[in-house]
Image (cartoon, rainbow, N blue to C red):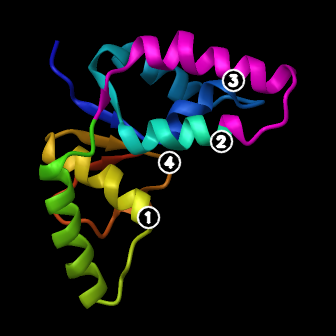
Amino acid sequence: MTLRYLLDTAIVSEPVTKKPNRKVIKRLDQNGIYCALAAPVWHELVYGCDCLPQGKRRTALEEYLQTVIRASFPILPYDEVAAAWHGRERARLEDLGRAAPYVDGQIAAVARTQDLVLVTSNTKHFAAFEGLTVINWMT
């Protein structure tokens, strides 16, 4: 199995929204074995869940994170190579007056340095990154 896609937080969260996008669900079903997460996405998921008050929703999300997400997708590190790429891209974008959110840069760096297609519903957030292939499974 060769990884092809890096999923961002919005795509991984889509199955547990009130009205999940059918296109995302279908693409996850078809391509799940080719997908991974970046460590910063895992951080966002855990953080978001832990910010919720104790209750049924939080318990259900904690279970989803462990039994579905963690069990289904490898979590790729934001490592030395990704950090160097991110640093260069961040400097380039700031020089152009187009600073990107830091975590988006980390996610983009993992995708780019691992030669993966970034799957997101927020393509505008990642459009300025050089050499990054981005697709939207929501459309």
Image quarter in which the N terminus is found: top left
| SS for callout 1 | helix
Q: Is residue 32 left or right of residue 122?
A: left
Q: Are marks 1 and 2 in contact (CB under 8 Å)?
A: no
Q: Amino acid at mark 2?
A: Gly
Please state the horizontal and vertical placement of residue 122, each as a whole percent of the image.
49, 55
Q: Is residue 23 left or right of residue 131?
A: right
Q: CA distance from mark 1 to mark 4?
A: 9 Å
Residue picked out by circle 1? 124
Highlighted range, magenta: 49-76
Q: CA distance from mark 2 to mark 4?
A: 18 Å
Relative vertical location of residue 112 with respect to residue 41 in this rendering, above or below: below
Residue picked out by circle 2? 48
Residue picked out by circle 3? 61
Question: 13 or 45: nearer the eye?
Answer: 45
Query: Looking at the image, can residue 29 be seen?
Result: no
Q: CA distance from mark 1 to mark 3?
A: 27 Å
Residue picked out by circle 4? 121
Sequence-first disc among 1 and 3 = 3
Look at the magenta stretch and give its main secondary structure. Answer: helix
Please state the horizontal and vertical placement of residue 113, each as a whole percent of the image.
14, 47
